[in-house]
Image (cartoon, coloured by chain):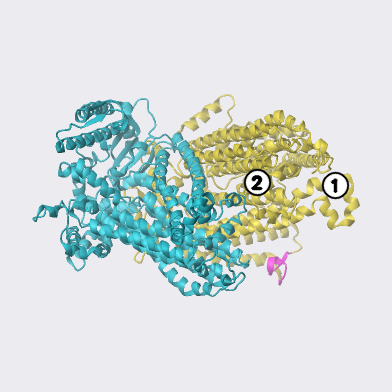
Chain colours: A cyan, B yellow
């Protein structure tokens, strides 16, 4: 119901704030003191180190070279310049495929927007229904929408044809993209160098045995059932308590360093602390002495616990990582059922060592099922009862709502500019705050569900979050924003009427979603690149905790793509785009700008900032694909509902074909591509095994795998280990095509090796 | 709305007809001439042969021993006497588990019925609501139902508690039964002797190769990807045309034999036939000469086609049966993905040779998906448009309907007995006729869908038929029977109102379903044991076609359990029982009688009559389990709907817990048991392989498997082959526990070896 003017005010505000963020970013990133905040990826890779300027000391902190400021926008082309194969090499396939989601958005919506503006906008504009209605609830934007077409008009044929084109085009792009990403994944896996998880299978629910320990039992079982293939296994210790002690020690050490630093700077005042809760209450003591004593106590406890875990047979959980002599045998074991009782000896691909979520490896079958049930019920309540506060805030955030609840504000609100701000800003912000705390809760719920790797936890949380956004943000905004009272009615409507109720609300809500896109999409993405929170945290740590260069390395928080919360949010834009493509094409440019802007920003971020916790080789793509298809089906159903109110009854059967075809398309794609994401074909395993056997006949695999799956708290020499593995990764045993192609391209025109890229990046500073 | 009297009339009619069938059966089975109709199983097994009485020739045809007639009922205890392990040995696990479905019904409903009659019937009877209503639409049976309880009464607590008990008890019994059957299946598979399908995998979608033939390509692929394990493979010929020629020849031969027999009996008239359609039109020719010429022509055609198929490389379809050196390797290959493209080199367990559905082995991936889509759409139309004729006939079949449409019949119908017959008989019969032609259509649809074994075709058709019965018979009778006009309303109701509409109809429809149970269940089962159609067909064949003893063997049609149509019908009784357990417990005894009677009858039939086409080792149980669970959930939802109209609003959340728990229970059971029905655990394969290697180190597996998977038309010496395999099955290479236990039990009290059982059966004749 907002007018063109409201929209443009909002657009201006959001554009300005986005611009402010970008300028701040452009300025801050040029300061050497912030180098580790905006380029941590390169530090982590060891390619870049702290600036050691030969000039005056001030150069170490502030950039005085005015020329660089003039080229502040160069990060954008720089971000786009790195070719994709190199991006995969540099940041991993997960990241490279993640930004392809934005690209997918552009591929889908740019042609649709062009067509919609060429065809639908003129059709709608000349509909002239709203000209007759002298009602303030309609704005100029609505004249561009389907609302402006008179009921029963033949013009709706254009919309139905457009719906077909949107469906076909989206399916085509989705199919192509799925194909590309499947090939990328297979190629990535095929060209990967030797990694422990290729040979290893996670075995859970080892049944108890009276005569044998877990370790012996696992060994015997696989010796018998995978003769000639079984190599070794590693038991899993229940080190949760030990891990928490290590965490505690780390925190205590930080506090001691903090107080020592304070004492050094101000040697007169010896710092004091209180022993109570969070240092807020209790007895006052000397801080450095107190923490030194605490640390000593914790170190002793840790040693005792470590001793206990290693020696106590009860600390071994009934699960193990079993390694095989070849990739073929591991692939076989992961894909087959071992025992006739399908709840014991469960095998699955071992996640990467760094991807393992250690707490959940030993949950019994029945408990796992009960947890899933409880979380399902909890999810239901969370989804459906979260709705009430959002609806409440949104109803307040309308002009009418505020004047009703707080009548004394009326004169202020009636001022034109204030009114624009409230209408353009508040509803989006209210939603945004609600959503901010949610991903943490959902991740906690996924952890309770018992998933065993960080990557699957992320995927599971994303699925939950998507459901939540769908019901609460999308449907919630459509229904309750218009009238909270509709909620009850909605629950009691017939299946054929629900799409109508929602569908009718869609054209009316176009402007609300435009605002939402600008706040959440534009300004949000610009805030992402500024990295305000990591910036502040880094400088705080740098001031109080950092003593050595290594400390400084650890003070960096490169962060990573928060798949669990970002991907469902992108899906909301897909959904909005698909829903509004036929109804109000005016929404599309806003979505396209979001996708384009986000693509550039995230490409920059994954090149320079993020350091992924794991590499799942784009295992999330089937989820992305499925959710776009869900969005497509929703858009078709809603259009069906909307058109059935426009006195063109015959449209329903014509449009009913679309969801049937779309769901069939989804099943087809699932059969065609999905197994590449969940299984590992034997053919590929044989190829890698054969190559390895030919090039390295004397490989000592047992030594290579010996400590691959050790709980992180047992890794005292963790960093050296990681480096060793890293080195192996960079010097693959078999010269693969991909590497040779890379070095070829490096020697030719566009080629950028990592070193060259660093220089490239440095040049722009 | 039928009164007690209507019900008892109907019961009397059905009981009498059932009794008549049983008496006819008791008489007919004692006649030696019918021996092959009522005991074909024993003939097929070669244990029983045509009676060669030493007495007068008439004894060969008619049984004159009056004493045997006095013991006509003995087949019932005889059927129950054979212990289950022996039954499995004798008839296969499929049959033994099939009759356990009836047993499951008894286990679920007998305790529930006892409890319901002890608790709910008194609660309902003393409700006294219907005493006040002086309305003819209620009968005495309704006084026993929930309708008699006043709205808002606290008595409904008894019903809610009962609903919980029904759910918990059903789930408990289902769980136990699933466990028992899983163990039986695993035990059956483990104690099975060597069979070709244990070593063999069906490979489909072999990709085309320019340089190699299909056979070479398959050989190379599996040599490379399953080194040390691959043994051999058999290509599959497209012999559909050849098979139809063989069929044609068989039919022509039969016709010639028929005319020859006629000629022998009446040498004066040389039989003539017409050459046109079905011998009804066209030129008249000498029959024997005509068919001799036709046979000669067909034999020539067949030889040419056979030559063509074997020599033409294009007759080889891109699929093959690949055999491995061990069961372990076959299990591995069947469960893993071979190539990175998941639409080629698809592997699955090979069905038993006799279970293969040869026509569907070579359907490309895309075509398969399109076929599924088309059949899904066809199924939708079939299910929803079949409803109209049924509703029409049923509305005619009510007294009011008939008097309206055919008013001149009014005086006849108003006669008390005629009225009873119409109300008790017609609605059931109308449904029955509609349903008779359906299974064939559904099986055809399943074949088009591209399933590759007879067992899976049966299961798939059963699923379709179940959906059909659910929507058309159950829901259709509840809604349209009451008012055909409700149909449209039903489609436009809210999700929360649909259970109410249907739920409210349930108590009113109790008597209709009692009638249905008596017609379909009682009389239908009694007709099953009489085998009227096979009886007539056998005697016709015996008269006209049989010349040798072998001909007579082939004239026997033992039939088999028609799983695709019988199982969904049983499920209807489960559904009715679960729905009415809480609402109108009076329905339960009728269902219990059905289950008990059917159990005895089918036990008799599988012992003496049926000869299964395949043995799937109870692979259908997950379907049976799932459908009972579906019935349970439907009953819970309908009860929820019904109670929400009784002014006890708080019942809904209390009852809502039940479907959630039930669905969770289903998922739990699926995870716990289902994989035993779809996968083959490596542990079991290793045990069998090891035993075999120890007992028979010099086994020539290649020779054993050489001709296992040859299209039946190429088996010229088919019968001898089958006998050889059979012999192998009876003399297992490894003395398993089961066999030793069997022989032990045979030597002790109750033990009956097959031979003893034959004598046993013979004794009762």
Q: Give residue B419's mark.
A: 1
Residue hosting label 2? B499
Q: Which mark is residue B667?
A: none
Where does the image place residue A182, in percent across and percent down from the top left? 36, 58
Q: Nearer the viewer, residue A322 or A307?
A: A307
Residue B243 at what x, y percent from top left? 55, 60
Q: Is residue A6 visible?
A: yes
Q: Is residue B631 magenta?
A: no
- Camera-side mark, 2 or 1: 2
Position of the C terminus of chain B by quadrant: top right
Who is closer to the viewer here, B322 or A642? A642
| Residues at marks 2 and 1, CA–CA distance in whole angstroms | 32 Å
Residue neighbourhood size for the residue with mark 2, other residues' Cα within 10 Å, grouped as few (<14), some (14–19), many (≥20): many
Q: Secondary structure at mark 1?
A: helix
Residue at point 65% right, 48% down? B497
Q: Secondary structure at mark 2?
A: helix
Drawn side of residue A710 relative to residue B695, left or right:
left
- Report the chain holding disc 2: B
Task: For the N terminus of chain B, give its image quadrant.
Answer: top right
The boundaries of the magenta stretch are B270-283
Residue shown at 31% from the left, 34% from the top: A236
Q: Earlier in the sequence, mark 2 or mark 1?
A: 1
In the image shown, does B650 or B39 lie closer to the viewer?
Answer: B650
Q: Is residue B275 magenta?
A: yes
* Residue found 15% across the figure and 38% down from its top: A265
**In front: B641, or B727?**
B641
């Amino acid at each position: 119901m907002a007018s063109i003017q409201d929209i443009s005010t909002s657009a201006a505000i959001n554009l300005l704030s986005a611009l402010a963020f970008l300028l701040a970013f452009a300025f801050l990133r040029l300061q050497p003191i912030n180098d580790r905040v905006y380029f941590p990826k390169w530090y982590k890779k060891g390619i870049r180190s702290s600036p050691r300027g030969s000039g005056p000391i001030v150069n170490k902190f502030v950039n005085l070279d005015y020329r660089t400021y003039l080229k502040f926008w160069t990060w954008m082309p720089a971000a786009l310049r790195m070719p994709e194969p190199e991006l995969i090499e540099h940041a991993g396939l997960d990241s490279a495929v993640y930004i392809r989601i934005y690209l997918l958005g552009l591929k889908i919506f740019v042609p649709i927007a062009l067509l919609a503006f060429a065809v639908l906008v003129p059709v709608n504009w000349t509909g002239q229904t709203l000209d007759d209605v002298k009602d303030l609830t309609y704005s100029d934007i609505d004249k561009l929408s389907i609302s402006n077409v008179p009921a029963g008009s033949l013009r709706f044929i254009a919309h139905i044809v457009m719906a077909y084109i949107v469906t076909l085009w989206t399916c085509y792009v989705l199919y192509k993209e799925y194909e590309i990403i499947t090939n990328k994944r297979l190629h990535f896996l095929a060209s990967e160098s030797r990694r422990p998880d290729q040979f290893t299978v996670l075995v859970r629910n080892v049944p108890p045995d009276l005569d044998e320990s877990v370790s012996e039992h696992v060994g015997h079982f696989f010796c018998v059932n995978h003769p000639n293939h079984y190599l070794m296994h590693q038991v899993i210790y229940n080190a949760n308590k030990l891990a928490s002690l290590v965490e505690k020690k780390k925190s205590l050490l930080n506090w001691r360093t903090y107080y020592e630093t304070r004492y050094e700077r101000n040697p007169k005042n010896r710092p004091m602390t209180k022993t109570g809760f969070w240092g807020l209450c209790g007895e006052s003591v000397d801080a450095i002495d107190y923490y030194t004593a605490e640390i000593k106590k914790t170190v002793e406890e840790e040693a005792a616990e470590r001793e206990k875990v290693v020696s106590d047979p009860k600390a071994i959980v009934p699960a193990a990582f079993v390694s095989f002599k070849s990739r073929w045998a591991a692939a076989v074991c992961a894909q087959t059922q071992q025992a006739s009782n399908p709840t014991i000896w469960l095998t699955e691909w071992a996640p990467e060592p760094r991807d393992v979520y250690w707490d959940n490896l030993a949950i019994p079958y029945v408990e796992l099922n009960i947890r899933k049930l409880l979380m399902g019920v909890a999810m239901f309540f969370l989804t459906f009862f979260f709705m009430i506060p959002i609806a409440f805030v949104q109803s307040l955030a309308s002009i009418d709502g505020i004047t009703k609840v707080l009548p004394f504000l009326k004169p202020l609100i009636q001022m034109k500019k204030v009114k624009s701000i409230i209408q353009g800003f508040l509803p989006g912000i209210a939603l945004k705050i609600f959503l901010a705390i949610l991903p943490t809760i959902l991740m906690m719920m996924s952890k309770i569900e018992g998933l065993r790797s960080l990557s699957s936890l992320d995927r599971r949380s994303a699925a939950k979050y998507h459901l939540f956004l769908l019901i609460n943000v999308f449907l919630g905004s459509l229904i309750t924003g218009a009238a909270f009272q509709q909620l009850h009615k909605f629950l009691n409507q017939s299946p054929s009427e629900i799409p109508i109720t929602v569908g009718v609300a869609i054209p009316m809500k176009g402007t609300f979603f435009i605002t939402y896109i600008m706040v959440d999409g534009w300004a949000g993405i610009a805030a992402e690149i500024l990295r305000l929170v990591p910036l502040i945290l880094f400088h705080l740590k740098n001031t109080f905790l950092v003593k050595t260069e290594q400390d400084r390395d650890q003070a960096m928080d490169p962060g990573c793509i928060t798949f669990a919360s970002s991907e469902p949010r992108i899906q909301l834009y897909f959904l909005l785009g698909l829903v509004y493509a036929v109804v109000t094409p005016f929404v599309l440019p806003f979505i396209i700008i979001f996708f384009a802007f986000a693509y550039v920003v995230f490409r920059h971020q994954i090149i320079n900032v993020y350091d992924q916790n794991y590499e799942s080789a784009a295992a999330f793509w089937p989820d992305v694909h499925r959710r776009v298809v869900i969005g497509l089906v929703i858009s078709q159903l809603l259009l069906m509902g909307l058109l059935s109110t426009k006195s063109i009854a015959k449209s329903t059967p014509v449009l009913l074909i679309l969801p049937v075809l779309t769901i069939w398309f989804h099943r087809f794609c699932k059969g065609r591509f999905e197994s590449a994401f969940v299984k590992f074909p034997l053919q590929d395993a044989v190829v890698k095994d054969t190559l390895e056997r030919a090039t390295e006949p004397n490989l000592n695999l047992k030594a290579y795998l010996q400590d691959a799956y050790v709980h992180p708290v047992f890794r005292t020499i963790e960093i050296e280990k990681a480096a060793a593995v890293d080195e192996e990764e960079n010097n693959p045993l078999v010269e693969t095509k991909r590497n040779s192609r890379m070095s070829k391209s490096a020697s030719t025109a566009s080629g950028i090796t990592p070193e060259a890229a660093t220089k490239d990046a440095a040049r722009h500073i």
